[in-house]
Amino acid sequence: MENWRVLPFQIFNAFENMATDEALFRVLQERGGPPTLRFYGWERSALSIGYFQNTATEINLNYCRRHGMDVVRRPTGGKTVLHDCELTYAVISKEGLPFFSGSLVENYKAVCSCLIRAFFELGIDVSMAKECRQEGKKEMGAICFAFPAPFELLSRGRKICGSAQVRSRGCFLQHGSILLDFDAEKNCRFILPSEERQADRCGFLRETVTSIHGETGEMMMPERFSGIVQRAFEVSWNIHFVAGGLTPEEEDLKNRLLEKKYRNPAWNLEGKV
Amino acid sequence: MPVFSDDLLYSREHVWVRVDGDFATIGITDYAQEKLGEVLSVELPEIESEIERDEPFGTVESAEKSVVELISPVSGDVVNVNEDIDDDVGIINSDPQDTGWLIVVEMKDLDELDDLLDAKGYHDFVLQEGEVD
């Protein structure tokens, strides 16, 4: 039975969260080590944008500034996520393990199959999207949760978890947001750059996104669901988790990334460091 | 079935190299573009920038919301960047080993080429990844 490290649920700000994920990914590439499953939350609501996104046209930056919303650029792909009421997970691993093949999609499927098992524990029937939804894409394209990529997770056809990856040198980082609750209006206000047809677009989001609260009527605490997810990984892959923290090298790199990259507006707003 | 061209060298990071004297034209392999799926965006270095072997020189994003770092097979100065990709990023998928080239590098150390694989060696390498017949 293979040993994995688990970094139990902790809450940090947006910049620390991204710096930590990237530090884990870089140190694994350089030094090796066990695969890691990390759980985290967000000190205050924040927007994360994908590596290639344009903040001038794909989020409502002025509204974010007026309301003190942190905006952080992820090292991974995909679109904008409002991190509000969610459990965030990150898997950091080499690609060569038995349950991962070299394909991007196969890695998504491997991780998402564990998450499906966790949702099932709550009585939520979740399945993988077979294709990307095209309806409304032009108007809603910047919102991650408006569009499931193939193999993202749906309950009753509504997206409940969004994930993204970065890969380099035979390692990958996949992180994702598991929605505990979802506020369509808040997503529209902070993400959509134009207020035109805001009500219609919020209606679209309400119809196409769900959450654990939306499916069960109960508020799930992130710590509790992280335990359920961890157990689902253990059972699905026959692995053993050892709880740990960052190594001194990871901590040091996290702090350097925080200063040079993730607290730097040039990175977060323009993608430059 | 991906194409493995005899006139190219290949890195284990799925990048090809076409050598012309001190110059190396670099792109991603046909095998890599198949694995990536549809490429949506690409970020490449500027002309006159310096790149180092085994270090990232660019990134691509696929439709599966994955960012993949491109690892340089050689060290040197970037002397040309494929501007056609700005107009049509799709050529990375449709013609990755020819018109979908990414950059041209003036190499600093030709001995670095010795670590690269020929077409058969690369084919055998990806066979080990279990996805090629």
Image: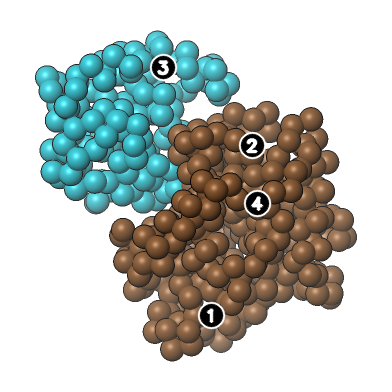
How far apart marks 4 and 1 lie (CA) works out to 36 Å
Question: What residue is disc 4 on?
Answer: A245
The C terminus of chain A appears in which quarter of the rendering? bottom left
Instruction: Please check whether the numbered discs 3 and 4 fall on a single chain.
Output: no
**Chain hosting mark 2:** A
Instruction: Say what amino acid the circle numbered 2 marks.
Output: Pro
Expressed as whole percent of the image width and height from the top left, the position of residue A180 reads: 73, 69
Question: What residue is disc 2 on?
Answer: A34
Instruction: Say what amino acid the circle numbered 1 marks.
Output: Cys
Q: Is residue A68 above or below residue A234?
A: below
Please tell me the numbered disc located at residue B122: 3
Q: Nearer the viewer, residue B83 or A97?
A: A97
Question: What residue is disc 1 on?
Answer: A188
The label nearer to you, 3 versus 1, is 3
Q: Which chain is cyan?
A: B
Q: Is residue A247 above or below residue A55?
A: above
Expressed as whole percent of the image width and height from the top left, the position of residue A179 reads: 69, 67
The label nearer to you, 4 versus 1, is 4
Q: Nearer the viewer, residue A39 or B82?
A: A39
Q: Which chain is brown?
A: A
**Chain hosting mark 4:** A
Residue lying at 26% horizontally and 20% vertically, measured from the top left? B112
The label nearer to you, 4 versus 2, is 4
Contact between marks 4 and 1 (CB within 8 A): the answer is no
Callout 1: SS: helix
Residue lying at 60% horizontally and 39% vertically, measured from the top left? A93
Whichever of callouts 4 and 2 sits on the residue coming sooner in the sequence is 2
